[in-house]
Amino acid sequence: MLQSHAWWQSGVVYQVYPRSFMDSNSDEAHLPFNFQLITTEKWDDQLLRSKVNPYELALPEGAWPNWVLSNHDNARVASRVGSEQARIAQMLLLTLRGTPTCYYADELGLPDVPVPPEFRTDPQGKFGAEFGRDPERTPMQWDAGINAGFTAPGVTPWLPLSADYQVRNVEEQRKDPHSFLSLIRTLLQVRRTQPALNVGTYQPIDAVPAGCFSYLRQYEDQRFLIVLNCGAEELEVELPRLGTGRIVISTHMDHEGTLDLARFSLPANEGYVIQLAEEIPA
């Protein structure tokens, strides 16, 4: 599969997609990265609505979207949106329609790692720390041992580890059912096994309070509602036409059970994946 970097402003993508990624023989880049969510300067429901919904509407029939939240050239998503919203961002990434790109260690909620001047390796960092890309390129943290299991003891990694690597690592988070990694693994498992989240349609839900971003994923009679609280205040959501549903995943892995969608509370910095009853209310 051919992937390509494609930097654009939101207005340009609609004019160039998809033929600008084809040659004269109609051979094409299979996955031109969609960086709309990686280059944003803010993070709220309005921003998500302005990026996701027009992109979905612009895609021709049969086109397949993709989403990227972090990469080796930009600050990690946990640093850009903050630790409270980092779980929301990953729930968004793994429930939108299309191919998600999860940058390594985002599944641990790892933010950028401060890199002292004497350890900087990125040439761009010579122009100042704000230009360097080393903070998002530090070693993967596998365990609490020496070098976090990334390389052998006695070997110095090319960049330092995060100060909390002994608790923020794969081995430790695997033990905790409420950890960031456990959230990612659960989202992936549900996405893989539920057709609506895998190949289903995307439908935005606009009748939600300010601060909430919401959408439906549907395949045949199977429907999932995703509600994301992008702020620090609890929200009251009213969606009476959707009937009832069951919380399948919550971002902090501590909410479950059936909800009457006519009115329910959505805690601050919380997101729900809700499987709706198959009967569609009149």
Image (cartoon, helix red, strand yellow):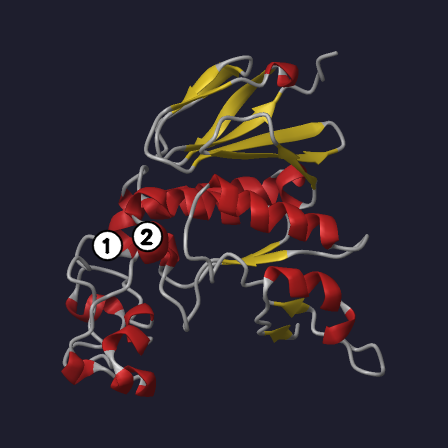
Where's residue 29, x and y in %? Answer: 70, 74
Q: In which quarter of the image is residue 281?
A: top right
Say if residue 233 shows up in the picture.
yes
Image label count: 2
Q: What residue is at 28 percent from the left and 85 percent from the top?
A: 127
SS state under label 2 = loop
| Residue at screen point 69% across, 20% down | 278
Which residue is drawn at the image coordinates 18% and 59% (left, top)? Answer: 144
Figure check: 14 above or below 228: below
State the mark number for residue 109: 2
- Left or right position of 201 against 275: right
Circle nearer the viewer, 2 or 1: 2
Determine whether label 2 and label 1 are within 8 Å by CB: yes
Which residue is at 50% across, 13% downward?
A: 263
| Residues packed near mark 2 inside 10 Å, few (<14), some (14 to 19) or many (20 plus) | many
Which one is earlier in the sequence, the residue at label 2 or at label 1? 2
Nearer to the camera, 99 or 202: 202
The x, y position of residue 9, in whole percent, is 59, 65
Find numbered disc 1 in the image and state the secondary structure of the residue it sits on. loop
* Residue 66 against residue 253 in the figure, above or below: below
Label 1: which residue? 168
Using the numbered discs, state the Cα–Cα distance from disc 2 to disc 1 in whole angstroms.
Answer: 8 Å
Work out whether 165 lies above or below 200. Answer: below
Quadrant in which the N terminus is drawn = bottom right
Residue 249 coordinates in the image, percent (x, y): 46, 32
